[in-house]
Image (cartoon, grey):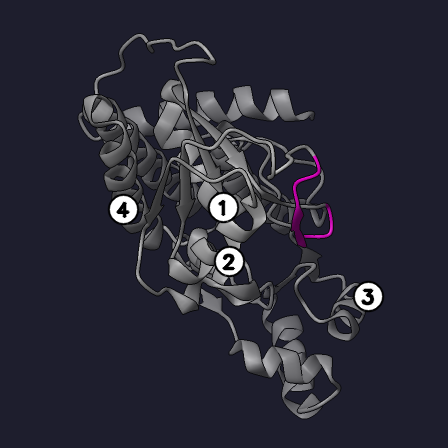
């Protein structure tokens, strides 16, 4: 099933789930979206691809988000080849914290921004590979979204109510997708060494286990193998699914690729703000299909009555 087909099916499935569960959209009234020309849009330059995706969603039709870094197919964060930082228009430079802002301003060079906004003074735990997990944390995302709302409203105060509605929709769709995930994988036992998705998986899975990342890195170096052997043997006997990703150390990943009860989750590559929720849903759906069919690529859509 292609991406468009999954998007349509996800929309139907999620809408029906909201209706029967009563979770709805948190009282947000759907209205016809306003439009804005390219000249009217506020150009926002963002260093983090994850922050850029959230900014794009909250800003909607009034914001033109320019991510200076993107995620490639290997899951690595690299410079965006479609953006020339030195010549791009930048009304607002938006950064997670002051350290990230310094790098952003350096990248812009002569193209100095009209304004700068930082969401936090210092946020070290949201940096590096482990930090990516917080951008996929249903508890952290609304918190970051609140700071984004303040930054955008400070720059465009007359659009505050619009940004506020977009944030409410963002929070509602996170909750709705997690609720769908609980229906799909709530009872599926998971052993997670992906690094990226631990909080997103924990939000939906009742039976979840994830070793400390330092231990996973040790396994990648060939250390502490007795604990790895015991963990994998327990997963085999108790029929737990072992999850890994491109962030998993290569030697460990190569070993897991040989196991029939292990599956690889895709790198966190988000193409646009609307693709964010489809990507989140696909994580849950691929695990459901792997559990049911032993193949995560089938992407069969479950019925609403069907238990995982």
Residue receiving disc 4: 147
Q: Inspect the magenta stretch and tell me whether residue 75 lies in it.
A: yes
**Which circle marks residue 50 in the picture?**
1
Q: Earlier in the sequence, mark 1 or mark 2?
A: 1
User: In terms of secondary structure, where does tag 2 sit?
Assistant: helix
Mark 3 Cα shell of 10 Å, populated few (<14), some (14-19), many (≥20): few
Q: Determine which quarter of the picture holds residue 167.
A: top left
Between discs 2 and 4, the one toward the N terminus:
2
Image: 130 above or below 67: below
The image quarter in which residue 172 lies: top left
Question: What number is the disc on residue 132?
Answer: 2
Q: CA distance from mark 1 to mark 4?
A: 14 Å
Q: Write the start and end of the magenta stretch as one range.
A: 73-81
Q: Nearer the viewer, mark 2 or mark 4?
A: 4
- Disc 3 versus disc 4: nearer the observer: 4
At numbered mark 4, what does the secondary structure look like: helix, strand or loop? Answer: helix
- Sort mark 4 into few (<14), some (14-19) or many (20+) by Cα contacts within 10 Å: some
- CA gap, disc 3 to disc 2? 27 Å
Residue at 81 percent across and 68 percent down: it is 254
């Amino acid at each position: 099933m292609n991406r468009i087909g999954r998007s349509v099916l996800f929309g139907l499935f999620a809408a029906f789930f909201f209706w029967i569960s009563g979770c709805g959209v948190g009282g947000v009234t759907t209205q016809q979206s306003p439009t804005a020309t390219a000249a009217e849009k506020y150009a926002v330059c963002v260093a983090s691809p994850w922050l850029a995706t959230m900014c794009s969603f909250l800003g909607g039709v009034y914001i033109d988000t320019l991510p200076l870094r993107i995620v490639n197919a290997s899951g690595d964060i690299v410079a965006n080849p479609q953006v020339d930082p030195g010549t791009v228009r930048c009304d607002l430079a938006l950064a997670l914290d002051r350290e990230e802002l310094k790098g952003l301003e350096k990248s812009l060079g002569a193209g100095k921004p009209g304004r700068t906004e930082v969401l936090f003074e210092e946020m070290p735990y949201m940096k590096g590979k482990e930090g990516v997990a917080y951008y996929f944390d249903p508890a952290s995302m609304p918190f970051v979204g609140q700071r984004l709302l303040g930054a955008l409203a400070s720059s465009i105060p007359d659009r505050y109510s619009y940004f506020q509605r977009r944030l409410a929709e963002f929070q509602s769709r996170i909750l709705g997708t997690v609720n769908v995930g609980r229906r799909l994988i709530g009872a599926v036992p998971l052993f997670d060494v992906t690094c990226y998705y631990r909080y997103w998986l924990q939000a939906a899975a009742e039976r979840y286990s994830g070793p400390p990342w330092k231990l996973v890195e040790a396994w990648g170096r060939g250390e502490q193998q007795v604990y790895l052997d015991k963990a994998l043997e327990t997963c085999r006997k108790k029929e737990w699914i072992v999850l890994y990703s491109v962030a998993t150390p290569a030697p460990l990943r190569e070993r897991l690729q040989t196991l029939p009860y292990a599956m690889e989750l895709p790198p966190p590559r988000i193409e646009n703000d609307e693709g964010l929720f489809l990507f989140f849903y696909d994580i849950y759906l691929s695990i459901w299909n792997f559990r049911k069919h032993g193949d995560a690529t089938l992407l069969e859509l479950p019925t609403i009555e069907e238990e995982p």
